[in-house]
Image (tube, rainbow, N blue to C red):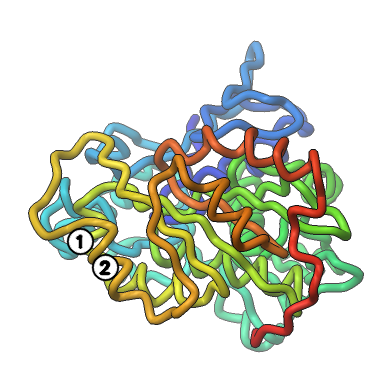
Amino acid sequence: PTLAVAGTHGKTTTTAILAHLLDGCPGKCNAFLGGIAAGVESNLYLHPNAAWTVVEADEFDRSFLHLHPQHAVITSMDPDHLDIYGDEQTFRDAFQLFAHQVENGCLVHADVNWPDKETERYGLASTRKEAEAWTYAAINPQVIEGVWIADVQLGDVWLDAVAFPMPGLHNVSNALAALALAHRAGAPMEVCRQRLMTFQGVQRRFTYQIREEAGVFIDDYAHHPSELKAAIQTARSQHPGKAITGIFQPHLYSRTRDHMMGFAAELSLLDHVILLPIYAAREEAIEGIDSQRLFENIPNTTKHLIDSERIFDCLKAHPPEVLMTMGAGDIDRYVAPLKQWLLEDLNRFKKTKTTTSP
């Protein structure tokens, strides 16, 4: 029987957390992830006689419509892949079809209305009263000594002061979604609480490459405006008062066209924007859509549009305090060289503390 994780954002992290939880429970699981889980250094879990199969249900090319899971979660439905779907309604219709392919089990969802399907809702709540109408909730999440902590409601089970392993409120939500599916699978929740504390993350999902007093380097897969916002806000909350330099490589001409102003708005949250050319992937160029047009729409005076070969020169001229690389193209091939270059001389990080607005 299959546990499937769908949604525009958070699929890989949620799937990886779920696999990690069940891997420590009786019966274990097979799992197929959309990224490399740190700690196991693989995107694959295989166990003889596994009780469950955990899969990432990807909406690209409608591939998730080949799945008929027993239980599933939908984390979000921000329009994406409109080169495949054509328009937002068709995109949402595909998620409706996926929801109705959940067989003999339950669909767990975030904040989406499913009037014609029996579902259970999960989410973040300020108080227990607010969460009464939900099946799964993290109550009053807050950072204590650098770690997100929240009381958690899992059906009729309550866990007090659960520690969430990854930075960012969005990752509290991802972990809650994983706990919800583990609960539906009958996993012991106290075991899951302990397993959650040992989760080491996923490569390219807010991954710290350098975390020193002299400076910070974070790599993230963010390639949609909502993902950029979550990554940048998380960096801001983790490193208050520090100026954030972001190197962003747009992914796909169609996505850049469809979310042009969204990208521009979220990139403006950075103190220093370094924008690279669009990574075409499977697409041909679209007339009038390029990084120059996106660059012109970013309301930030501290910005540079450069070719990838000039990244190091740009950073030499403008040393960062907190550096982020973001995108789903081939920007990842610069992560290791950047890390080595920065570690060779930590003086390449900016030393003067810059006060920035949250």
Residue 190: x %, y % from top left: 84, 50
| Amino acid at circle 2 | Met
Residue 47: x %, y % from top left: 66, 16
Question: Which residue in the protein does label 1 denote?
Answer: 257
- Quarter-of-image position of residue 354: bottom right
The quadrant the C terminus occupies is bottom right
Q: In this view, does 162 lie above or below 23?
A: below
Q: In this view, does 122 lie above or below 328?
A: below
Q: Can residue 178 be seen in this view?
A: yes
Q: Which residue is drawn at 35% across and 52% down?
A: 250
- Quarter-of-image position of residue 316: bottom right
Is disc 1 in contact with disc 2, using a CB cutoff of under 8 Å? yes
The mark found on residue 268 in the picture is: none
The answer to which of 73 and 221 lies nearer the viewer is: 221
| Amino acid at circle 1 | Arg
The mark found on residue 260 in the picture is: 2
Q: Can residue 70 be seen in this view?
A: no
Q: In this view, does 104 lie above or below 135?
A: above
- Quarter-of-image position of residue 86: bottom left
Q: Residue at x 56, y 42 (%)?
A: 15
Residue 155: x %, y % from top left: 66, 63
* Crowding near the residue tagged with mark 1, few <14, some 14–19, many ≥20 C-alpha atoms within 10 Å: some
